[in-house]
Amino acid sequence: MRVALAHYQEIALKGQNRPWFIRHLARNVRDALAGLDVGDVRLPMGLVEIPLGDSVDVTEVRRRLAQVFGLANFALAHRVAPDVDAITEAVLRDLPRGSPVASFRVEVRRAHKQFPVKSPVVERHIGGLVQDATGWKVDLSHPAFTVWIEIVPKAAYYYYGREPGAGGLPTGTGGRVLALLSGGIDSPVAAWRMMRRGCHATFVHFHGHPFTSHASIDKVRELVRVLAPYQLGAHLMLIPFGELQRQVTVTVPGPMRVVVYRRLMLRIAERLARKVHAQALVTGDVVGQVASQTLANLAVIGAATDLLTIRPLVSMAKEDITREARALGTYPISILPDEDCCTLFTPRHPLTRAKRHQVEAAERDLPMAEMVDAAAAGPVIEQVEWPVVKSPPGR
């Protein structure tokens, strides 16, 4: 029987809470593969097994499993009876012989400790027969090719290659967060990092329309489409911010405006977070990257809300963030030109060492409560569904 066989890693360290995490993981795997020709998810002793039907799109299975948080790695495998002769026969039959193999080893994981033959004995037995059949060189330290065998009660599995999973913790185990998405390089990576810790993110974007074009909105929609598969769907809230910025420019001295803009964003985001039961805000702030992100400014901006504000990238270098964005697939979208609200009504020389009492004094001349109420009252909410399950023909 063909199966997809996946392993988890961090979940195994969860002690008495492990069954709860595993149930979430199994549900997420099942939901991620919805609409494909696969069987019920099984959980044999530290593994996740998904039977594959005859008509299954294997490439699509691999693509979806690679985006399931909680999986350390996975493989396309075969299931056979837990018997040395049956395993040996199947391994020899299915060895890839179309291209040369410089070296190999056999690695057996015997989770079923009552299995009568110990792992090293199985490795030597099958390894010797593989070498006799192929002439391949054995290399136990740095093999070019590995025959993996796993033995559990009532079943054994063999496969010839592993693929990395997304790692982290299963979506839904870490609570809800509201992620501020600007359209730049940093904020999608920050959101993804929190999602990888099991948090389910709702996204909010502050845009400058009608004072700017729709470019930033279009970018953020594409970014959410990249991120949504990792948490099986997402919601995006769009907040018009241009008019609010215009009101700030009338009242607040130029150098202080960026700090006030960002404090206003956090107040609105906090209100929205309460609506969706999010326990924290997530931003892409990095210390010292731009004028508004000095320690002094971050402290004053963060004081605008009592809700926990998480900055996953706060100490990272730009090149490291960019590397993660490229791997994630958000970088080509983030660098597209746009007109976001961050560049709207921005002073030439923004304040880098804001003092809280001065900022609060400037804000007293603004109808802050009314501004927050108006922005949070009716955001445009868009949903990205994942996976997109197509109905069979004729329905």
Image (tube, rainbow, N blue to C red):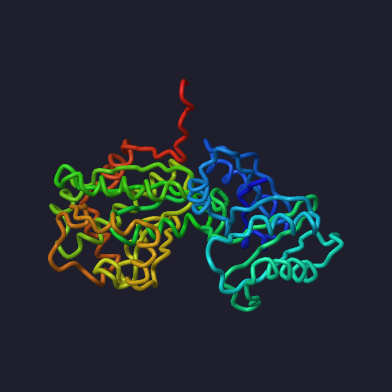
Q: Position of residue 375 (x, y in %)?
A: 29, 42
Q: Position of residue 105 (x, y in %)?
A: 66, 71
Along the viewing direction, whichever of 166 and 267 lies nearer the viewer: 166
Q: Position of residue 174 (x, y in %)?
A: 55, 53
Residue 168 seen from this side: yes
Q: Is residue 73 above or below residue 216?
A: below
369 relative to 249 in the view: left or right: right
Which residue is at a point 76% across and 51% down the rendered structure image?
155
Q: Is residue 104 above or below residue 19?
A: below
The tally of labels here is 0
Which residue is at a point 45% across and 60% down the rendered structure image?
193
270 relative to 363 in the view: left or right: right
Along the viewing direction, whichever of 34 and 311 lies nearer the viewer: 34
Give the quadrant of the N terminus.
Answer: top right
Which residue is at a point 32% across and 65% down the rendered structure image?
300
Residue 41: which quarter of the image? top right
Which residue is at a point 26% across and 72% down the rendered structure image?
353
327 relative to 134 in the view: left or right: left
Q: Position of residue 232 (x, y in %)?
A: 48, 44
Residue 295 seen from this side: no
